[in-house]
Image (cartoon, rainbow, N blue to C red):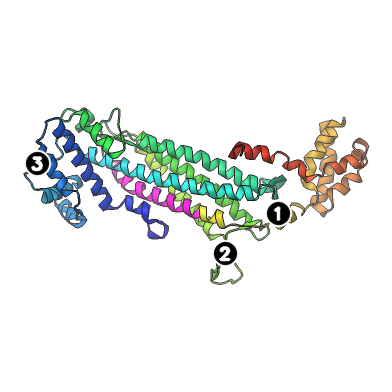
Amino acid sequence: MIPRYSRPEMVAIWSPETKFRIWYEIEAHACDAMADLGVIPRENAEAVWKAKDVEFDVARIDEIEAVTKHDVIAFLTHLAEHVGSEEARFVHQGMTSSDVLDTCFNVQLTRAADILIADIEGLLAALKKRALEHKDTVRIGRSHGIHAEPTTMGLTFARFYAEMDRNLSRMRDARAEIATGAISGAVGTFANIDPAVEEHVCDKLGLVPEPISTQVIPRDRHAAFFATLGVVASSIENIAIEIRHMQRTEVLEGAEFFSMGQKGSSAMPHKKNPVLTENLTGLARMVRAAVVPAMENVALWHERDISHSSVERMIGPDATITLDFALARLTGVVAKMLIFPENMLENMNKFPGLVMSQRVLLALTQAGVSREDAYTYVQRNALKVWEHRTDFKEELLGDPDVMAALGADEIEDKFDLGYHTKHVDTIFARVFGED
């Protein structure tokens, strides 16, 4: 992933140095287990640990691979250079390359998942804070981009909180599903290696043994993992789109923080563009781009092929690094976001009283008017407000059919804004708990 959209901790997981360190630990722990079983001499297993503080030379491994055309063999050759060829002769005993590659990949994905889980928890904290801050800040709700009925800014943040809380559960489940390892040998039958070796290696690396592998760990696990990343990315875009709408000049109910010295346009000095949330929309597309290839990786020939390998070398780092960056960026946007309550009320009243139309409709039906007639009475007055920017309540008070059914006092009662926010506390209790 390009540095512009990367954070160091996640990038480090995917570095060649980290990868080779994990490969080394897999091989060293496997040697320990085989020594315990009496398969290899104890002194040979102990000799492998002489390299525990070695900084593996990536350039040297690449040099060897240029000849061998095989990355695991290149690494094992380099390891023997440090340990000694005689001492290292039992390394990789009974194992196949996928035992190392797949187990390492899943270690990397679980570590990436831990960072993403922490990212989501940070975003949840920011969303909750803004939700509580604006629990009673009234704004217009919209459907199809058109004014619907009043809601609150707090409910908007609470809705996003609940969505991200579901994503937190999904991410934890995805981590649990991907945290498996396989040290089962060619075609996964354990013919040349004892299952106890797999159990030992997995235990040391924080994984659980794959119940049944072929020569690879089943890729449905990876498909589910990357699908989860795609869902989280879509939720990021969902929030970003709402903020982008709020920052539109003719709306301006909220906006990204605009720092001192920031420039919005090279041509127009007045511009304050929602560049961060627009960026998040684009980043979400890139994370989702990994989902279909991950799904297509599930179908492999027989006990294995390597059609999945090139895909995973790209989507593993790119999707996790991008999502990590996106979650951190969105957390900052939410935490520092500017909110404009006055503009929310002004927007709601652009067509005075119009958003109370359903209350009037229901009141007419309760007063004995058929639903068809009630809808006609309300709509004809609402259309006048749409066309002439008149006051909806005044139009109703001047309509003899409406007045005959309701009267002035009852019509007045239907324009109480508090009616629409009376259950906000109930919703907040559902989302955040009774406290």
Whether residue 111 is visible: yes
Circle 2: residue type: Phe
Cα separation, mark 1 vs mark 3, equals 73 Å
Q: Residue at x 67, y 37 (%)?
A: 426
Numbered circle sitting on residue 344: 1
Q: Earlier in the sequence, mark 1 or mark 2?
A: 2
Dot 1: element = helix
Residue drawn at point x = 54 percent, y = 56 percent: 333
Assess whether residue 305 is covered by the magenta stretch. Answer: yes
Q: Quadrant of the C terminus?
A: top right
Q: Looking at the image, is mark 1 or mark 3 earlier in the sequence?
A: 3
Extreme-left residue of the structure? 86
Q: Which element carries disc 3, helix, strand or loop? A: loop
x, y percent for residue 293: 38, 42
Tag 2–tag 3 contact (CB < 8 Å): no
Which of the 4 image quarters holds residue 110? top left
Magenta residue span: 303-329
Circle 1 crowding by C-alpha within 10 Å: few under 14, some 14–19, many from 20: many
Query: Measured from the top left, where is residue 190 in percent x and y?
Result: 20, 28
Label the magenta part by its dominant secondary structure. helix
The residue carrying pointer 3 sits among few (fewer than 14), some (14 to 19) or many (20 or more) residues within 10 Å by Cα, namely some
Residue identified by numbered label 2: 258
Residue assigned mark 3: 89
Q: Residue at x 23, y 40 (%)?
A: 100
What is the distance, in whole Å, between disc 2 and disc 3 at their CAs? 61 Å
Q: Earlier in the sequence, mark 2 or mark 3?
A: 3
Distance from the alpha carbon under mark 1 to that under mark 2: 20 Å
Residue type highlighted by circle 1: Met
Q: Answer left or right for 319 relative to 237.
A: left
What amino acid is found at the position of numbered circle 3 in the picture? Arg
Evaluate whether residue 295 shows in this view. Answer: no
